[in-house]
Amino acid sequence: MSRETSLNSVIGLGLLLVPLWAYWADEPFIITLSTKVAILALAGVGLNIALGLGGLVSFGHAAFFGIGGYAMGILAAHAQTYVPLMEWPFLIDGTKSMPIIWLVAMVVSALVAVLIGALSLRTSGVYFIMITLAFAQMLYYFAISWPAYGGEDGLSIYLRNSFPGLNTLVPIQFFGICYALLMIVIAFSARLARSPFGLALAAARQNEERVETVGMRPYNLRLAAFVISAAITGLAGALYADLNRFVSPTMFSWHMSGEIMVFIILGGVARLYGPVAGAALYIMLEHFLGPISEYWQIYLGALLLLVVLFARGGLIGTLAGREVAHD
Amino acid sequence: MSLVLLIEQVLNGLQSGVMLFLMAAGLTLVFGVMGLINLAHGSLYMVGAFAAAATAAATGSFLLALIASLAAAAAAGAVIELAVIRRLYNRDHLDQVLATFALILIFSEGTRWLFGSFPLFLDVPSYLSGAVTLPFGIQYPLYRLTIIGVGLAVAVALFLLVSRTRLGIRIRAGESDREMIAALGVDISRLYTVVFALGAALAGLAGAMVGAIQSVQVGMGEPVLILAFVVIVIGGIGSIKGALVGSLLVGLTDTLGGFLLPQAFGLFMDASSATSIGSALASMLIYILMAGVLIFRPSGLFGRA
């Protein structure tokens, strides 16, 4: 086992053991914090497929996070008020069932990602960063000015959505769902990176001309990566909205896009468990620095600046060495 | 809908366009010369506005406030260039985005710490308040007219600076070949600091001028920053002409869209849903414009392919 693999198991197990301890010690707030880490890490794992593997610096992943959130909010709001989502041409009711909500969140995120990606991937570099940011901002303003689903105030859901066989209102059970999804997606993302598609995508990042020369189109590879990445971030958005039982346009804000990206950088770009380490570090900073100073984000900014300038490779890079492990 | 109202909206669009230009010009210069994407440009806009509000509160002079905004933003720009930004020129865009994102956090929270969370107010001076009467009997606020004038004057000055002065020659040379002008004996790192401070000063001026018609608060810079990104994408990165055309296009589209779309929808649906659908669509209009430009010119209207 390489150092990174053992570090990954420590991080993965740590995220499981902390809430189990909290459950034993009756500290539900710690369980909720761990759930938040798992969900935000999931969003980061999604972005990491585009950013780490594909080299696509998307500064607009809040768009998909928000779409996931609103997919949950809109479906659950209709179920809560017994008003069908649409009656024509066929009847669609709202739902409180998590698996259906997840599916809708992922499909809608993926469809929007096809549109945004098809346009944005015509460009590269700085243009791509600015355009993805702008599209996310477009959805943000749309969510604010569209009054049907709460507009600026957002939507509250009274009861958490249901999962067959579990009581999702019990914090540890909801954590279990989120943790299981995170692990499934990490395993998927590890397989994806080693699959022919993942190798071609990484090659397109390193040398576009060579990939073209062997007869593949980098544009298609990147679009596929962008769409997969968006669907995962959308799933995380749906879970996040369920955690808070609330969804608002802030899930679309550029600050959210920045935060998801920060998780990856704090943890380490293109590292399998980078987003998990980064999200855990971020939430811990927020939790421990928050009570000390109202202006804790100054410290966060300073830390981030130091990581970018001096500790490239993030937390995992610093602890496990520069070489990116392939397992 | 009267013609007078329409002309008023066109002027409002022009006014927001020229202010956007002040932001976009700095961003595009910094990108063109140094190849750097600077998210903290919005923070410099905020620094300018706060410096102006604080100076106006202390001295009561609007002119001093404007000078303070220029000086404070240029100084803040020079400091972050020397301390942070110059380490980023050789890094990839991801590092630049994150480091400047970190700067935003520091600037925003630092300003909140210094000035508190409540918005400050910067009053339009008495000699610029009130309305003037334009042809066709249009009443238009003098201050907004002044903003348009100042913005256009800065645009002209910037064109002259870049095309006629030695600094401008160096800036253009730095855009096309930085090793060469370093070899010719130009102190390239000082040039970079000067360009960065110049862009910062323009952003600070915009912040102060807009601060007098809106409130001065933490986070005021980011929405403008993102609009400025849209402008640059439309105009083409590195092109000041593109920044001007893009700014005016975005300013006019945004203002006229918010005004005309609800009315256009009102022609065939009831008033309240026309207002809600129209304004929701209007908020997306500039991004649709950007997407349209991208389909036909992926590197912007005046960008180098």
Image: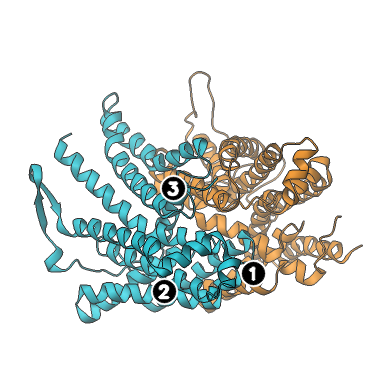
Chain colours: A orange, B cyan
Q: Quadrant of the C terminus of chain A?
A: bottom right
Tell me if mark 1 has few (under 14), some (14-19) or many (20+) residues whose alpha carbon lies within 10 angstroms of its own: many
Name the foreground residue: B147 vs B244: B244
Going by the image, does A321 lie left or right of B171? right
* Residue B14 in picture, x, y percent from top left: 27, 49
- Protein chain holding label 3: B
Tell me if mark 3 has few (under 14), some (14-19) or many (20+) residues whose alpha carbon lies within 10 angstroms of its own: many
Name the foreground residue: B1 vs A246: B1
* Foreground: disc 1 or disc 3: 3
Q: Which residue is mark 1?
A: A308
* Foreground: disc 1 or disc 2: 1
- Protein chain holding label 1: A
Q: Which residue is mark 2?
A: B111
Tell me if mark 2 has few (under 14), some (14-19) or many (20+) residues whose alpha carbon lies within 10 angstroms of its own: many
Q: Amino acid at mark 3?
A: Gly
- Protein chain holding label 2: B
- Give the farthest residue toward the right: A1
